[in-house]
Amino acid sequence: MAEHTPRRNIETWAHELPASFIECRTMGHRWEPHSAVWDKQARAYHVIHECDRCHTQRKAWWSRNGEITSAGYSYPEGYLTKDVGYIGADGRGVLRTEYLARVFTATASRGTGNGNAPRTS
Ligand SMILES: [Zn+2]
């Protein structure tokens, strides 16, 4: 607790996030691939899901009956919000705005130079 990390503006933070993080934070992770391996010693399945977009991993132990006995996530560098605090409804709105700007503005502006724009003749 030695130093106080200053809070960053959430718009600035969202603007600097990789597009994959924006997509996962807006729409949830895409859990693929996944694996389940029976562990004799633990007498449980070690179930690992990985997001193929941002590479967050969800690791859990599932009993033979399907009960989850422990679970945890490991996030890629930069995914967690150390310096912007909790992302509430406003923050999620900012992320969605950023998502729209990244995903759709990029596609729309591509039409102007290289002949991809729909034509009416
Ligand atoms: Zn993800």
Image (tube, rainbow, N blue to C red):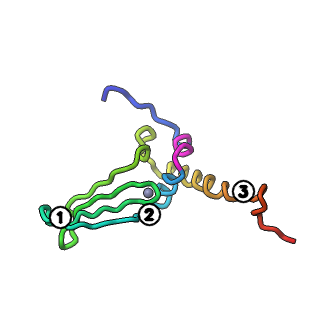
Image quarter of residue 60: bottom left
Q: Could you say where residue 100 lies in the image, as x and y percent from the top left?
A: 61, 56
Q: Which mark is residue 84?
A: none
Q: Residue furthest bottom?
A: 65
* Mark 1 crowdedness (10 Å alpha carbons): few <14, some 14-19, many ≥20: few
- Which tag, 2 or 1, sits closer to the chain's start? 2
Secondary structure type for disc 3: helix
The residue located at (30%, 62%) in the rendering is 48
Determine if the magenta segment contains residue 30: no
Between circles 3 and 1, the one closer to the viewer is: 1
Q: CA distance from mark 3 to mark 1?
A: 51 Å
Q: Mark 1 and ligand 1: say if the CB distance to the nearest ligand atom is below 8 Å.
A: no
- Relative to 89, 113 lies left or right: right
Q: Which mark is residue 30?
A: 2
Q: Is residue 75 above or below residue 42?
A: above
Q: CA distance from mark 2 to mark 3?
A: 27 Å
Which residue bears the numbered disc 1? Answer: 39
Q: Could you say where residue 88 lies in the image, as x and y percent from the top left?
A: 45, 50
Secondary structure type for disc 2: loop
Residues in magenta? Answer: 12-18
Amino acid under disc 1: Asp
- Relative to 86, 13 lies left or right: right
Secondary structure type for disc 1: strand
Q: Is residue 80 above or below residue 30?
A: above
Q: Mark 2 and ligand 1: say if the CB distance to the nearest ligand atom is below 8 Å.
A: yes
Question: In the image, ligand 1 is in what quadrant?
Answer: bottom left
